[in-house]
Image (cartoon, rainbow, N blue to C red):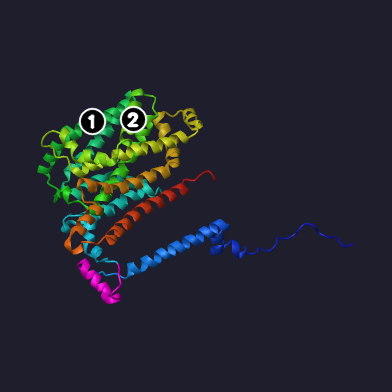
């Protein structure tokens, strides 16, 4: 008698997925032609993009790179492509790229900002990528003082004496905190650092320079310009606004009435004032409140105002991340016996920063783009230099080439920050593990 099996006794051979659901065709079907509405929108978008590229691409590639003026550029294009042809005059970028990059920085000293930028990449690497050795963070902490010396020059003892202020402040924090608490420790650290910078730093640096003269040729701030100026202000504001924003966010959520009132007042005042107003204060009004003869560098003043402006917005972004944490996380930190600062460092703040990554990076991108506002107060950022180039008789009338090049460079920086944000979000994704 024959028995029939109703359960398969061996695995069925694997089959390839349907062509319409895998590969490029599957991706297009899922993302571009998923339903009649998406299909119509995709087709309309492709037509619009195609029409735009049909007009732009010929203009971009019918160009001249060797002309020395706008008229010469147009003549070269007509000579090659016909009397009615028009094209881009990229020769202005070839001729003025150094000015757009370095402003009026002395050409024989270009190696200094180039070296500072290369070292910047090395300083950012251990901060952005945790797989690198943590010992490299020491270089990241020293980089601001190295870059200051390279860009502005002068005596090496000036940046080193400024660094000493942070060291003494940190030492005061470590000595006072165990005995009198974290608040008095922080206040003591700030007071010690300020006293060092105001009263002691200058004479010490002068004495050391007379004993061991180590210096670079000084460069005035008025010679700074171009993308070098934008990157300097932008990176400084980004690096300084995050820790200040964290402290402001914690202060706003504090139970100490005075601390909370000061933080709320600062945040609301800064967020209620346009950045351009703060820049005008930095460039003109601030000198009124300083002692006569005080030389307060204009770029440093702008950095301070940009940092404070960004820190106020950063505080609200981080406060949103703190508010999004469930109450159980705070209770868990208390159950572990952690004090306030240990709980913030080990439990609360890592989760809040993870939640706030999109808002933090968005604030960074906005800050970097806002560096172009310094043109209003007379600093020659790329847009300010483009106006000066267009005022030159040889390039009077050129517009799209300069603005397009500047927009491309800013897009590269901002897009890089956006992609890193996405990488960091994927790396910290833990809900599915």
Alpha-carbon span between mark 1 and mark 2: 22 Å
Is residue 146 at all visible to an observer of this figure? Answer: no
Q: Residues within 10 Å of mark 2 (few under 14, many from 20)?
A: many
Please determine whether, in this image, residue 208 is positioned above or below residue 110.
Answer: above
| Residue stretch in magenta | 68-87
- Looking at the rendered structure, the secondary structure element under dot 2 is helix
Residue 318 visible in rendering: yes
Indicate yes or no whether the magenta region holds residue 348.
Answer: no
In the image as oriented, which residue stretches furthest toward the front? 84
Is 34 placed left or right of 209 in the picture? right
Left or right of 161, for residue 54: right
State the mark number for residue 397: none
Name the spot of residue 119 as percent of width and height, x first: 28, 52
Q: Residue, x 43% and y 62% (percent of image)? A: 49
Q: Is residue 363 above or below residue 42?
A: above
Which comes sooner in the sequence, label 1 or label 2?
1
Single out the residue that lies furthest toward the right. 1
Q: Pinpoint residue 234: horizontal percent, then vertical percent.
A: 29, 47
Q: Quadrant of residue 363?
A: top left
**SS for callout 1:** helix
Residue 80 versus residue 314: which sits nearer the camera? 80
Q: Which residue is mark 1?
A: 192
| Membership of 79 in magenta stretch | yes
Residue at coordinates 17% horizontally, 62% vertically from top-left? Answer: 393
Q: Quadrant of residue 29?
A: bottom right
Number of marks: 2
| In the image, residue 103 above or below residue 358 | below
> Where is mark 2, residue-wise?
263
């Amino acid at each position: 008698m024959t028995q029939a099996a109703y359960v398969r006794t061996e695995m069925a051979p694997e089959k390839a997925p349907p062509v319409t659901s895998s590969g490029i065709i599957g991706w297009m079907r899922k993302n571009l032609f998923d339903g009649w509405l998406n299909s119509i929108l995709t087709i309309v978008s492709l037509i619009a993009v195609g029409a735009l590229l049909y007009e732009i691409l010929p203009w971009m590639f019918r160009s001249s790179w060797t002309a020395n003026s706008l008229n010469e550029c147009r003549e070269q294009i007509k000579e090659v492509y016909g009397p009615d042809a028009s094209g881009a005059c990229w020769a202005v970028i070839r001729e003025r790229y150094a000015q757009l990059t370095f402003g009026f920085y002395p050409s024989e000293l270009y190696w200094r900002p180039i070296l500072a930028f290369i070292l910047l990449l090395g300083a950012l690497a251990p901060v952005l990528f945790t797989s690198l050795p943590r010992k490299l963070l020491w270089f990241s902490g020293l980089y601001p003082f190295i870059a200051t010396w390279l860009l502005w020059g002068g005596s090496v003892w000036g940046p080193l004496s400024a660094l000493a202020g942070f060291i003494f402040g940190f030492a005061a924090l470590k000595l006072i905190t165990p005995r009198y608490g974290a608040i008095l420790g922080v206040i003591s650290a700030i007071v010690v650092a300020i006293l060092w910078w105001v009263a002691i730093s200058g004479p010490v640096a002068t004495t050391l320079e007379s004993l061991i003269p180590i210096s670079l040729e000084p460069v005035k701030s008025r010679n700074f310009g171009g993308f070098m100026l934008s990157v300097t202000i932008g990176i400084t504001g980004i690096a300084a606004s995050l820790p200040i924003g964290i402290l402001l966010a914690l202060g706003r959520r504090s139970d100490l009435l005075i601390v909370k009132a000061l933080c709320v007042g600062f945040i609301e005042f800064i967020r209620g004032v346009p950045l351009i107003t703060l820049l005008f204060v930095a460039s003109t009004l601030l000198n009124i409140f300083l002692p006569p003869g005080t030389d307060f560098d204009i770029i440093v003043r702008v950095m301070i105002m940009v940092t404070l402006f960004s820190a106020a917005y950063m505080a609200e972004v981080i406060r949103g991340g703190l508010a999004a944490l469930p109450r159980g996380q705070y209770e868990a930190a208390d159950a572990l016996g952690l004090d306030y600062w240990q709980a913030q460092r080990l439990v609360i703040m890592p989760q809040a920063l993870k939640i706030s990554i999109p808002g933090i990076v968005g604030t960074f991108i906005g800050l970097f783009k806002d560096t172009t506002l310094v043109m209003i107060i007379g600093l020659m950022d790329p847009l300010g230099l483009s106006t000066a180039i267009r005022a030159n008789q040889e390039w009077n009338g050129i517009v799209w080439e300069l603005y397009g090049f500047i927009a491309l460079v800013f897009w590269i920086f901002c897009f890089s920050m956006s992609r890193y944000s996405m990488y960091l979000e994927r790396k910290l994704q833990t809900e599915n593990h």
